[in-house]
Image (tube, rainbow, N blue to C red):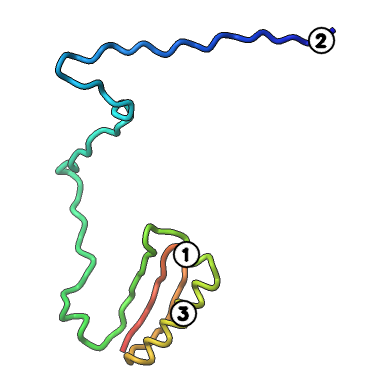
């Protein structure tokens, strides 16, 4: 005996109330819009400035730098990309006179310790 399945009629579309006179219907995407951003409460601390005045960077010294990839894509998981960036960094440091003391490639950013 053959196995028979029963076909069902498609479900009816959900009922939408008619648009108000003079006002267009609300687009479907409007129902899924996230709430508007609210300002931080006053009790939250204000983040400190992470940069020194520009004059500080003109002096000889060592500096810790972090470079982040655009869109935080994991570009440095590709060895060719990381090696190319390292070769470029070595080339530019030779031309400009700064030294690279340490570096650390992470998937989406690079940490550097450089100096003069």
Dot 2, how many residues are within 10 Å of its Cα: few (below 14), some (14-19), or many (20+)? few
Which quarter of the figure has residue 88? bottom left
Q: Which mark is residue 75?
A: 1
In front: 9, or 109?
Answer: 9
Q: Quadrant of the N terminus?
A: top right
Is 16 above or below relative to 83? above
Q: CA distance from mark 3 to mark 2?
A: 68 Å
Q: Residue 112 at what x, y percent from top left?
A: 39, 76
Which quarter of the figure has residue 27? top left
Is 30 above or below relative to 46? above
Q: Is residue 51 left or right of residue 82?
A: left
Q: Residue 100 at what x, y percent from top left?
A: 40, 84
Which quarter of the figure has residue 4? top right
Q: Is residue 6 left or right of residue 21?
A: right
Is 109 above or below relative to 95? above
In front: 71, or 6?
Answer: 6
Task: Kindly identify which residue carries mark 3.
Answer: 86
Q: Which mark is residue 2?
A: 2
Q: Residue at x 41, y 66 (%)?
A: 109
Dot 1, how many residues are within 10 Å of its Cα: few (below 14), some (14-19), or many (20+)? some
Task: Please tell me whether mark 1 sits on a helix, a strand or a loop.
Answer: helix
Specify which label sits upstream in the sequence, 3 or 2.
2
Task: Please tell me whether mark 3 sits on a helix, a strand or a loop.
Answer: helix
Specify which label sits upstream in the sequence, 1 or 2.
2
């Amino acid at each position: 005996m053959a196995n028979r399945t029963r076909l069902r009629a498609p479900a009816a579309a959900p009922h939408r109330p008619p648009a108000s006179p003079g006002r267009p219907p609300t687009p479907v995407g409007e129902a899924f819009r996230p709430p508007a951003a609210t300002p931080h409460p006053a009790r939250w601390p204000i983040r400190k400035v992470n940069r020194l005045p520009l004059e500080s960077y003109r002096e000889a010294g060592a500096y810790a730098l972090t470079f982040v990839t655009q869109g935080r894509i994991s570009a440095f998981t590709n060895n060719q990309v990381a090696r190319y960036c390292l070769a470029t960094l070595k080339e530019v440091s030779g031309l400009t006179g700064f030294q690279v003391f340490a570096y650390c490639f992470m998937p989406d950013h690079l940490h550097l310790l450089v100096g003069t």
